[in-house]
Image: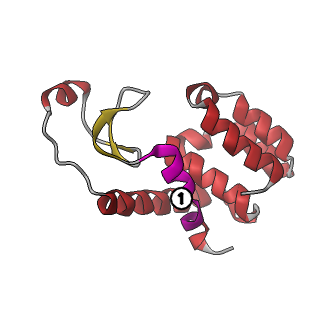
């Protein structure tokens, strides 16, 4: 499958992340900006930095695409099964990687086992059985439904 499949997920990520030009604190307590880009600031630094430059949509879109491209390559390298999934399920995995990072998605061990077996219902159940599901339930449910039905 084409490496550019990840590009098809950009609009879904934009919908979920919502553009924020200024620095804000995400639900996990991290300084974040643009389309959910975590900034490398400690909590101490976050409190000291008041006037960081606002990002434009163009800057944020560039970073979104760059981060998603890197994440899609990394997860395909870490989990070769991704290449065997249909487009929708690849996009779900790429979306998850954008949101929580490749290391976080790799930890869904039973989801990966289910995907290897082609059992999307169990994969979806394993997605529900996670801290991620309780942190962002509406977003997680949308991704779980796509994993289940294979529809974008």
Say which quarter of the image contains residue 1.
bottom right
Q: In this picture, is 65 found above or below 53? A: below
- Measured as percent of width and height from the top left, residue 117 is found at 86, 50
Tell me, what colour scheme is on the image? secondary structure
Q: In this picture, is 121 found above or below 78? A: above
User: Which residue: 48% across, 58% down?
Assistant: 68
Please say whether residue 32 is visible from this viewpoint.
yes
What is the chief secondary structure element of the magenta stretch? helix
Q: Compare residues 42 and 88 and report the one nearer the observer.
A: 88
Which residue lies most toward the bottom here? 2
Q: Relative to 23, is 27 on the left or the right?
A: right
Q: In this picture, is 30 found above or below 85? A: above
Say which quarter of the image contains residue 27.
top left
User: Which residue: 14% across, 33% down?
Assistant: 50
- Measured as percent of width and height from the top left, residue 150 is found at 79, 55
- Measured as percent of width and height from the top left, residue 2 is found at 64, 75
Q: Magenta includes 12?
A: yes
Please say whether residue 101 is visible from this viewpoint.
no
Say what secondary structure mark 1 lies in: helix
Name the quarter where the C terminus is drawn.
bottom right
Question: Magenta span covers which residues?
Answer: 6-18
Q: Compare residues 38 and 19 and report the one nearer the observer.
A: 19
Q: Magenta includes 52?
A: no
User: Which residue: 13% across, 28% down?
Assistant: 48
State how many labels appear: 1
User: Which residue: 73% across, 45% down?
Assistant: 112
- Measured as percent of width and height from the top left, residue 142 is found at 68, 42
Estimate how packed mark 1 is, as few (under 14), some (14 to 19) or many (20 or more) residues with alpha carbons within 10 Å. few
Q: Residue at label 1?
A: 11
Q: In this picture, is 18 found above or below 66? A: above
């Amino acid at each position: 499958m084409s490496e550019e499949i990840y590009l098809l997920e950009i609009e879904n990520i934009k919908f979920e992340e919502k553009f924020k030009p200024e620095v804000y604190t995400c639900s996990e307590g991290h300084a974040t900006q643009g389309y959910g880009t975590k900034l490398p600031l400690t909590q101490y630094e976050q409190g000291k930095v008041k006037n960081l430059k606002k990002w434009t949509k163009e800057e944020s879109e560039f970073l979104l695409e760059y981060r998603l491209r890197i994440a899609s390559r990394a997860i395909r390298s870490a989990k070769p099964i991704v290449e065997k999934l249909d487009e929708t399920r690849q996009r779900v995995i790429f979306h998850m990687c954008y949101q929580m990072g490749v290391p976080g998605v790799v930890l869904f061990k039973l989801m990966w086992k289910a995907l290897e077996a082609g059992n999307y219902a169990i994969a979806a159940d394993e997605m529900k059985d996670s801290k991620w599901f309780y942190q962002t339930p509406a977003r997680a449910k949308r991704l779980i439904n796509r994993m289940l039905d294979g529809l974008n």
